[in-house]
Amino acid sequence: MLKIGIIGGGIAGCAAAYYLSKKTSGITIFEKDFIGAHSSGKSNGSIIPFIDYDINSYSEQLSDYAISVHNNLKMKFHSKFYYSKKPVVHLFKNNSYSKIYDNYKKNKLNKEFHFLSLGELRHIDARVSEEIDGGLYIKNSLEVDSYMLSKTFFDNAIQNGVNFVQKNINKIDADSGKQVRIFSDDESYNFDKIIISNGSWAESFFMDFFGKSILTPIKGQILRMKNITPGFKVSFWWGKNYITTKDQNITWLGTTHEDVGYDESITSDSKNQILQKAKEIFPFLDENFVVEQTACLRPMTKDSLPILGRLKDFENIFLCGGGSANGILFGPAMGKIMSKDIFEEQLDTYISEFSVNRFL
């Protein structure tokens, strides 16, 4: 029996615990706060097909696999949390998405999207600003309660015998024979293999191993709004900003991208920035609708893509994170991939492109 330690109780770590628990016992999750305490529990839960200029990119292949995992989870856990179909419209000016469209059309790939003119957009929502030229409509998108998804993975893993330790792991000793020793403030633990999946806080381990920065914590602030009638039937995105109406008629509006270290506080400047950008698209919005403001840290790599697979020079340390703004999209798939990679099983998608080696 392998003893496996998982550092981090976000969506990827909990997914890894769940999939591993169906194969073996001796698994322990370590989380310094509570399950889904950070970005996994505060995300807007958008699951949008990854659209790349390079249609044959490995990132798009990973996205396609991730969506298939979500669709399977939707059927398996349908009574446990809220998945919903939610089309997405990427708003644009000056045909900024035309290159993507031309690539897909030329290669005849079966992607369920098409372009909408401003007039067609206003049939969907008449409140869209006339400054918008059109939109890229993506049909096969989902939304999920990301906290409940993380918690459902965790609860099922615990039912399957996974242990939970609520402690902060601050050191990894990979030189202790065939095992890995990890340390909290007051105790140490030995494992045959470990998975590092603690989001932005994995950066301290990378500094210890490589002496260089691999991840950057990027703060994103989100506004939650009430009394917007009617709510938004689709999710609208423009650049890295979005607006979507979720359960109980709560509208989410985001987001900022702030390189401010590990500061998770909310600020009035960011609220004003989010509202200002939103008013350019939906002029009727103002702060009177805002009822809550949240912030979380997303682990951003230099290429905004995940880190997956074994740690360089260490056969028993695995990395699973760096999903950034696509953490909820990629998280369950990354956890499932880790459960296979640890046992050297054939993987469902290609991951060597996501090795940490690309940054070394």
Image (cartoon, grey):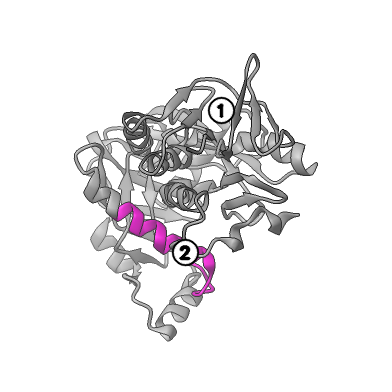
In terms of sequence position, does the residue under pointer 1 or pointer 2 come before the other?
Answer: 1
Q: Position of residue 156 (x, y in %)?
A: 32, 34
The answer for how far apart the CA atoms under marks 1 and 2 are is 40 Å
Mark 1 residue element = loop
Q: Quadrant of the C terminus?
A: bottom right
Residue 313 in the magenta stretch? The answer is: no
Residue at the spot of label 2:
349
Tell me the tag on residue 316. Answer: none
Mark 2 residue element = loop
Q: Is residue 249 left or right of residue 170?
A: left
Residue at the spot of label 1:
267
Q: Which span is picked out in magenta?
A: 49-71
Q: Amino acid at mark 2?
A: Thr
Q: Amino acid at mark 1?
A: Thr
Q: Position of residue 96 (x, y in %)?
A: 50, 70
Dominant SS of magenta comes to helix
For residue 34, say whether it is visible. no
- Closer to the camera in the image, 136 or 339: 339
Task: State the residue at coordinates (29%, 35%).
Answer: 250
Q: Position of residue 87 (x, y in %)?
A: 29, 57
